[in-house]
Image (cartoon, grey):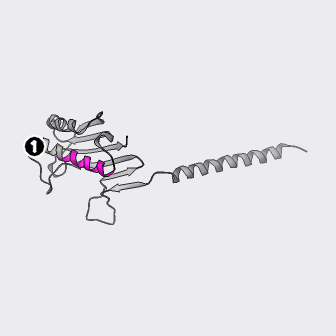
Amino acid sequence: MSTKPIAFVLTAVVAFGVGLASSLTLMSTVSAQPARRYFTPRSPGDPAVTPFSGAVLAGSTLYLSGTLGLGANRELPATAEEEATNVLNAIQAQLKEAGMTMDDLVTIQVFSPNAANYDAFNSVYRSYFTKEFPARAFVGSGTLLFGARFEVLGTAVKR
């Protein structure tokens, strides 16, 4: 009597078991994903609002949508420094709502249609941090919505 058929069956059972174990591991990994928390949430069911949420917290990472620094009626502040203050205050408020601070920011992207506003933005930006600055890009862009000088987005991870 040959042992080859038994060896084949054992190999198939072991392979099936490994595949099953891998599938179960994948399923537990997928189900173990952190819950999401939305700030200024918006959904397709409300067509009267713009189609994005203000920020999304996934685990300990907060993803901040692009934010403008306009006044209450979408008016452009008189100076670039005022607008930088407005946009950074808005970012700071979103972080606070998520239980974070500006020092939890990991990366920031600043969009501006005029690179001449770089120094004005930096003069305000520096005052918002007590620890290391996050990684950052200051990107020359086309025209921003409502004539804004700055749009800022970022990612934060709780320290």
State the image coordinates of residue 28 (x, y, percent, origin top left). Answer: 56, 51
Query: Left or right of 3: which side holds 76?
Result: left
The front one of 97 and 5 is 97
State the image coordinates of residue 120 (x, y, percent, origin top left). Answer: 14, 37
Q: Residue at x 64, y 48 (%)?
A: 21
Disc 1: which residue: 79
State the image coordinates of residue 50 (x, y, percent, origin top left). Answer: 26, 59
Q: Residue at x 24, y 37 (%)?
A: 138
The front one of 125 and 20 is 125
Q: Residues within 10 Å of mark 1 (few under 14, many from 20)?
A: few
Query: Left or right of 106: which side holds 93?
Result: left
Q: Residue at x 88, y 43 (%)?
A: 2
Amino acid at pointer 1: Thr
Magenta-colored stretch includes residue 90: yes
The answer to whether residue 9 is above or below residue 131 is below
Q: Which residues, given as a range, are shown in magenta?
A: 86-98
State the image coordinates of residue 93 (x, y, percent, origin top left). Answer: 26, 50
Residue furthest to the right: 1
Q: Residue at x 28, y 65 (%)?
A: 47
Tag 1 secondary structure: loop
Asked whether the viewer can see residue 151, the reply is yes
Magenta-colored stretch includes residue 134: no
Residue furthest to the left: 78
Looking at the rendered image, the quarter that the C terminus falls into is top left
The tally of labels here is 1
